[in-house]
Image (tube, rainbow, N blue to C red):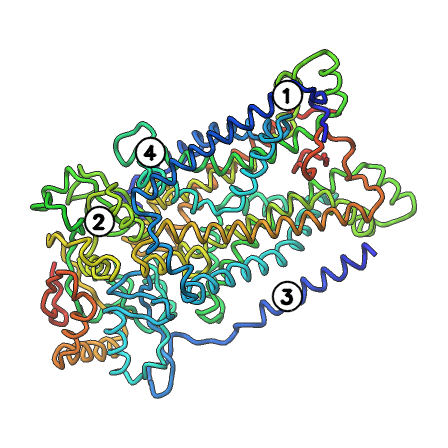
Amino acid sequence: MTSVLYDAQGPRAKQRNIVYTVLFLLVAAAVVWWVYDGLAAKHQLDWIKWKPFFTSSQPWQTYIWPGLQNTLKAAAFALVIALPLGALFGIGRLSDHRWVRMPAGVVVEFFRAIPVLILMITANAAYSEYTTISSDSRPMYAVVTGLVLYNASVLAEIVRAGIQSLPNGQTDAAKAIGMRKGQTMLYVLLPQSVTAMLPAIVSQIVVIVKDTALGGAVLTFPELLASVRPMSANYGANTIACFTIVALIYIVVNFALTSFAGWLEGRLRRGKKSTGAAPAGGLETIGAPALIIDDGRAV
Amino acid sequence: MFDFLEGYDLLGAFWVTVQLAVYSALGSLIWGTLLAGMKVSPVPLMRGFATAYVNVIRNIPLTVIIVFSSLGLFQTLNIQLGASDFTDINFRLAVLALVVYTSAFVCEALRSGINTVPVGQAEAARALGLSFTQVLRLIILPQAFRSVVNPLANVLIALTKNTTVAAAIGVAEAAYLMKGMIEKEAQLILISAVFAFGFICLTLPTGLILGWVSKKVAVKR
Amino acid sequence: MQLRKVTAASAAVLALALTATACGSSDDKGGDSAGGGKKINIGIKIDQPGIGLKTPDGKYTGFDVDVATYIAKELGYDAKDITFKETKSADRETAIERGDVKFIAASYSINDERLQKVDFAGPYLLAHQDILVRADDDSFKSPADLNSKKLCSVAGSTSAQNVHDKLAPKAQLQEYGGYSECLTGLESKAVDALTTDDSILAGFASQKDFQGKFKLAGFQMSNENYGIGLKKGDADLKKKINDALTQMVSDGSWDKAVKANFGPANYKNEPAPKIGNIVK
């Protein structure tokens, strides 16, 4: 594991590393002890506050699991709708025709500028005004709509950057063998840019999962974070315990998502011997290369 | 139609939003840069810390972080950040939480920026005998920053909108006022529209100006 | 191979999008007024002990829930026909206007702004803004003491706005998204008092984890007339609900519900209010 940023480490540097490590661990241990002590002194670690989660399945059955289901459902729907929509708008912004490029640009910029929460509220009102969706499923529709509008515009930017990151030679070659514009996009540019886009798309998926929580804040969408409120009201305001448990669930779910995507990305990269979007010699040797949105350069 | 706006300090609320956004932006730029530096540093522990930090923080909803900063840090561990009354304490805690959260994204953006700098740059710098921090500070980061203006602009826009979450601990910013107005006036849609417009006024120019800046400073290679 | 993947993916996307639009197109607009085996949707709170709470076994308890169940029974609905729906404070008027719920019993105080949008039956309970303090804290003698104290309430709530505007403008007010956070602060002495309607406070204080830990100060700092919110202009429903409320008081169920839900908290409830008598 060497990097071009620094020379290979000699014995002295290695010793220094050990000193740093020990110092850091000491500080970390001190902080952990201090937090533990503070929480314990304020009775936040009392067993009675945590007991419900470990001795009974009820809080999981009644609050957390249904909440998690709703969160995942909304995120999944939002993703599968936003992804193609985003691709469409991203490609639209690259169009040669002004009348396609301009509206696509306006839509993307507009929906990126508004807080998702407000999009959700508006969608909720619109659905109740103009459709016959039942009031039970309306919050879900509104949440998904808000997420789709916002994330499609962000994904559009990612797609646009991913396609722009490909070398011009790809387009030229496609033209040379007589492909039309649509064919070039579908068979040459899109498939190649997917690898470059993946890390950015994955971050966006995580954002989608977390943003479902906005639906619980104002609309009555019973998602994971919203389950904290009735739960802590029942168990003697063990707010810190409830939030901790829920935060851990979010971390596990999102970590699973990112790990899966990392694995997928590795497979995609291995599958193709070379693409224009593959790293052309970045500086970093650790971690997955990431795409830079909008500067037309993938690494 | 908009007479319900009377008696509310809309501008004041949005001013708090702007303050939150600006302080948090500065803070997260600094902390995010440090994190990115750690992530490419020679010390394995620093790399591990930065990676773990980004992975954990990015995966938690901001609401949880903000509520923890108030319930955990202030109410339980008694950290007041040098302020004495609730308004100041909450404001500072909100900035702290926003910095903690946003810096993870700044770090990621910057890391990808570091990747765009050609290898030759770092090699040349090392050949001159520059140390790791010098390579990073003098050669790599200045070039990296120039290539990530646009991603950073996206982070800043997201941050501006994320300040609305500070209402969860009672910082009197735009979303807090919106909540109060909805409770009192029973005008959900109109009030939402007004605040949506306010946010567009804040975020659209940010995006456009920084988009222009990014074109100006982009490194031509 | 790449192409096949893309095609498969887009097919999956299409299929999912279709199912998304296909499901849930059934229409139930708050239940029928006729009753008799029909369903009814009622708006309540699910995070206020004593008022409306979703308990770990998935059931709902609280005074508002009892009142709502009684009214529904009088309107001709069995307990099993009732669907309780959470209505957040911000969403109550719109939920009624849209017909998501037939009526709302959710610590919903009657005021002029709300009366422009919805009608109210009742009131069925007269609550007052009060404070909840630690049981061993005797420093609160009168509402004037609040000015030098650290208070906590829910962000944007009427109680919080009252503190800012008239009750204790000089007091420090911590605001959170919910009451539970305030109680955590009260427990750890970061705040001195939680302020909101005494009915809600009584509900929290009488939870088994809290019994003996907190007490109500008994300040009557405002009048909150809890009413049953219903669609504007539905005079028929309003009359039926009012009749049901009158009967609930006269047959003793009202007293029983108050005792059962607020009992253990040293909460002295007001006598049942007379229908239409809004205490300013």
Going by the numbered disc 3, the residue's amino acid type is: Leu
The extreme top residue here reads B128
Q: Chain of mark 2?
A: C
Which secondary structure, mark 3? helix
Residue A89 in sight from this viewpoint: yes
Numbered label attached to residue C16: 3
Going by the numbered disc 4, the residue's amino acid type is: Ile
What residue is disc 2 on? C194
Q: Residues within 10 Å of mark 3 (few under 14, many from 20)?
A: some
Which secondary structure, mark 1? helix
Left or right of B217 on screen, residue C126:
left
Where's residue C207, x and y in %? 24, 61
State the image quarter where residue C39 is shown: bottom left
Marks 1, 2 in one chain: no
What residue is disc 1 on? B136
Marks 3, 4 in one chain: no
Q: Chain of mark 4?
A: B
Contact (Cβ within 8 Å) of mark 3 with mark 4: no
Alpha-carbon span between mark 3 and mark 1: 47 Å
What residue is disc 4 on? B79
